[in-house]
């Protein structure tokens, strides 16, 4: 029950996520195939539940739920092949190969449907573990569906292993999870085919072996879905971490920016002030605000640097002023500028970054802002 709930939750989240992506890019064939894969997995999962199977069978008679569940699994495997075919080929070649792959799919579904039709109704409702494999229709049903599953999953595994070698993280990690899940599915599917033939021949099979194979298959399905979702989830997590980091830096720049903005309001790149809850609500704009605040702080320091140089009077005029020393004289320098004091003839570099990256510059500005905040709180 716990495993079923976990699988259902994963499928529901995955389906909602992929549908939201597909709405934004409806012409993306790879994304469409992945989304339809998850749709088939979700519907097959519902039909695999006792309540779902009883409801469908009550409408049409025993056996339809099982037939639909297996047909959906076969279509899922076909769509999984399409993901790789569309990703690896141009539009024409991918569509042509996908069309050819419909032949074994429709053949397997057709044979399984015919096998279900010739099976006595009293034998249709049994699970794989309790099914009477001596009944030709039952054995043929499981052999046809199982054979295509092994074929399709093995082909998908081959494509996955091929892509792992040329992929980079996080896609490689996701493909490794998919490959592990597909390997389990291929092995357990092959084992079930062998067990079906053995039972069809009248030989007994340990029940623990059948249960173990089913358990491994149940574990492989959420592992497979997790592998599909991992690259996008990892990318999203990286984006969230970057957003959170830049929002913290943006907030830590507030003391420095406020002091400079009061002295040089004309340097603002955005004339409408915003702060507090407005900054919190505008999540998507935090990167632009981050860059803008850093540029405004740096512009303000360039303009106030002559006054800082006059107050600091360093023994080495060419040496840059570190953040801690700049914080000591910043308010006095700003007061001199506001009072209209003449611009000194010598400037000084303030809080210079160690590299050319803007984030390095922001770290120096944040250090100056933190030192300024500490002086304000200690005053």
Image (tube, rainbow, N blue to C red):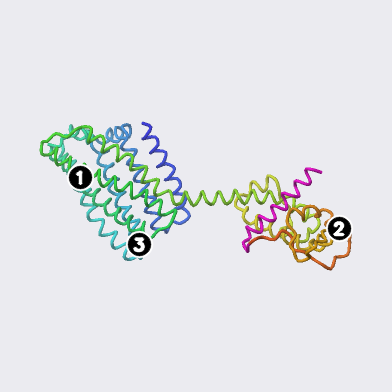
Badge count: 3
**Alpha carbons under labels 2 and 3: distance apart:** 65 Å
Say which element carries label 1: helix
Say which of 305 and 5 sits in front: 305
Among all residues in the image, which is located at the extreme left? 201
- The residue nearer to you, when weighing 93 against 301, is 301
**Which residue has dot 2 on it?**
338
Q: Is residue 42 above or below residue 179?
A: above
Q: Quadrant of residue 5?
A: top left
Report the residue marked by disc 1. Answer: 112
Position above or below: 57 against 72: above
Neighbourhood count class around disc 3 (C-alpha, 10 Å): few under 14, some 14–19, many 20 upward:
few
x, y percentage for residue 234? Answer: 47, 50
The location of residue 333, given as percent across then percent down, is 83, 57
Q: Report the mark closest to the observer, 2 or 3.
A: 2
Tell me the crowding category of disc 2: few under 14, some 14 to 19, or many 20 or more residues within 10 angstroms, Cα based. few
- The residue stretch that appears in magenta: 355-379
N-terminal label among 1 and 2: 1
Question: What crowding class fits label 1: few (fewer than 14 Cα within 10 Å), some (14-19), or many (20 or more)?
Answer: many
- Residue marked by disc 3: 88
């Amino acid at each position: 029950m716990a495993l079923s709930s976990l699988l259902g939750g994963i499928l529901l989240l995955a389906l909602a996520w992929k549908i939201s992506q597909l709405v934004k890019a409806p012409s993306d064939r790879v994304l469409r195939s992945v989304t339809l894969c998850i749709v088939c997995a979700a519907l097959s999962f519902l039909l695999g539940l006792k309540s779902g199977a009883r409801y469908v069978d009550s409408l049409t008679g025993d056996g339809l739920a099982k037939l639909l569940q297996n047909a959906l699994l076969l279509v899922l495997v076909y769509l999984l092949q399409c993901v790789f075919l569309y990703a690896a080929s141009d539009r024409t070649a991918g569509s042509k190969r996908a069309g050819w792959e419909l032949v074994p799919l429709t053949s397997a579904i057709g044979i399984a449907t015919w096998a279900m039709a010739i099976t006595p109704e009293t034998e249709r409702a049994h699970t794989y573990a309790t099914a009477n494999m001596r009944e030709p229709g039952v054995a043929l049903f499981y052999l046809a569906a199982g054979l295509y599953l092994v074929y399709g999953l093995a082909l998908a595994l081959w494509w996955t292993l091929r892509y792992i070698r040329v992929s980079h993280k996080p896609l490689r990690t996701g493909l490794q999870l998919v490959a592990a899940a597909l390997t389990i599915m291929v092995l357990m599917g092959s084992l079930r085919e062998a067990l079906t033939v053995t039972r069809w021949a009248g030989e007994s099979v340990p029940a623990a072996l059948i249960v173990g194979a089913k358990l491994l298959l149940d574990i492989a399905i959420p592992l497979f879905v997790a592998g599909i979702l991992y690259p996008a989830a990892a990318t999203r997590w990286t984006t969230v971490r970057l957003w959170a980091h830049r929002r913290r830096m943006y907030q830590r720049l507030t003391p420095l920016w406020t002091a400079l903005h009061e002295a040089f309001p004309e340097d603002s790149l955005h004339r409408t002030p915003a702060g507090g809850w407005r900054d919190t609500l505008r999540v998507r704009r935090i990167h632009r605000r981050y860059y803008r605040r850093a540029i405004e702080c740096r512009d303000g320091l360039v303009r106030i640097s002559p006054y800082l140089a006059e107050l600091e009077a360093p023994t080495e005029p060419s040496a840059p002023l570190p953040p801690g020393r700049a914080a000591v004289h910043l308010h006095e320098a700003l007061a001199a500028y506001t009072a209209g004091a003449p611009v000194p003839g010598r400037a000084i570099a303030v809080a210079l970054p160690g590299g050319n990256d803007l984030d390095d510059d922001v770290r120096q500005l944040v250090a100056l802002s933190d030192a300024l905040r500490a002086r304000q709180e200690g005053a």
